[in-house]
Image (tube, grey):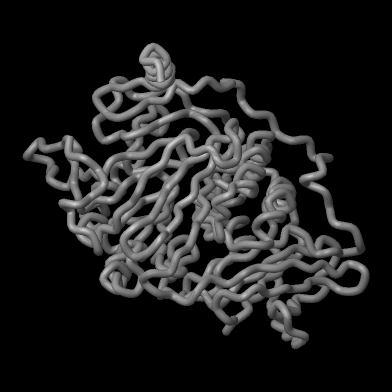
Amino acid sequence: MNRHIVYLFLGLVLGALRSSNGGISSRYSRSNDISADMPLNSDVFAVPPGYNAPQQVHITQGDHEGRGVIVSWVTPNEPGSSKVTYWAENTQLKKHAVGKFVTYKYYNYSSPYIHHCTIKNLKYNTKYFYELGTGNATRQFWFTTPPEVGPDVPYTFGLIGDLGQTFDSNRTLTHYESNPAKGQAVLFVGDLSYADAYPLHDNNRWDSWGRFVERSVAYQPWIWSAGNHEIDFLPEYGEGEPFKPYTHRYYVPYEASGSTSPLWYSIKRASAYIIVMSSYSAYGMYTPQYKWLMNELPKVNRTETPWLIVVMHCPLYSSYVHHYMEGETMRVMYEQYFVQYKVDVVFSGHVHAYERTDRVSNIAYNIENGLCNPKYDGSAPVYITVGDGGNQEGLLYEMVDPQPKYSAFREPSYGHATFEIKNRTTAYYAWHRNQDGYSVEADSFWFHNLYWTSTSDSSAASF
């Protein structure tokens, strides 16, 4: 190849990226307009045909090991049936599980009938069909259970956060659905419907969002975590119970991991151990969340589930100006334990942009010694922010300058990510911006498992 062509190519590549004290700040060109809400008469919000037809169908893991599924849905006119009929692919034997329904009131809004039914003792790695509703309003869906828990079981997670119901939200979901990597379950890092952004926290927006995402969440489990837009705290109008709409609509298997709250819990899935934490619940010493986590981390068996993943909404490391250092108190509280137990990666949202750090920690600091600079730590997690689902408030462009050394890659674009576990030692991570082709990776990283790989072989370089 002509060397002038090579120089031209390198110039174009380097021109699209900006190096600084840290890693890369992408200069990819995108619109800076705030994404508009999709009209409520859009087909993505369509009500299914038939009287009292089930809608807003979604599933999540229903136990700790992956053999259970919680099926949730809404009936708008009357309670109807809470029964789920299900059967394995290539069999004629149909089984039934019966759940229950709940309702709630929020200021001037009365919810429809919200059904939750747990299907138990399913076979691993099996495709199941399931039916909801009765008569001409019966609807059918399917899901595939995960492989049996084990150290070398490959599995691919999708990662989405801060989704909302804008045109960009739709692009993100479409992009994820079309990704050739084919995520098998989604780790959702919080901020679902943004209903609280509408006057009086219009809970009708919870219903429209549930219909919007049904095309994905009815067919593969989304592992839920709560963000600040799920708090729905409105005491001046008599709504003083935090998280009321979220906890009524999105059940999780928190009791299976010994948690006392659906806002923090854990599951096993294939070769991963997922710990979900709540950034907006009490987490100081002696609180229920703290006590639960201190009991939970020592229980993780890395010879069974080598990949230890933490999901929370507010990032502990972020170099964007907006929300800067909002996670600092939680970092001071928990980072030492993430390093001690060799958490592989922490996924967060909240910041409406994308960022990936190196393996860093700041655990030497105390109020007297002044050692407050993050440094490379081969036993520390990588911190990844994927608060770029679409939201309602637009992207964040203003970054801390110069780029901190702990920041490896950052870009204010909408997108999603995938985390593809290969075996007990290796996983491949990729971030996909919405503007690119379905297989294009705007950022990628090979993870080497912290438990099974010595720190000298870690995938990040010292700085």
Task: Please identify the quadrant where the N terminus is shown.
Answer: top left
Q: As drawn, which residue projects farthest toward the front?
A: 1
Q: Residue at x 17, y 35 (%)?
A: 463
Q: Quadrant of residue 425?
A: bottom left
Near-viewer residue (289 or 365): 365
Pick whichever, 156 or 376, lies toward us. Answer: 156
Seen from the viewer's position, the closer of residues 119 and 263 is 119
Percent from the top left, x then y, of residue 227? 50, 48
Residue at the spot x=45%, y=65% of the render? 154
Q: Residue at x 44, y 21 (%)?
A: 27
Residue 159 location (% of width, % of height): 50, 50
Q: Is residue 161 visible?
A: yes
Relative to 106, say whether 439 is above or below: above
Q: Is 354 displayed left or right of 165 in the figure?
A: left
Q: Taking 271 as reference, is 178 left or right?
A: right
Can residue 241 be seen at all in this image of the molecule?
no
Could you say where residue 380 lies in the image, as x and y percent from the top left? 24, 51
- Residue 150 image point, x, y percent: 40, 74
Please give the name of the residue rendered at 87% of the width and 64% of the height, measured from the top-left corner: 52
Q: Is residue 75 left or right of residue 419?
A: right
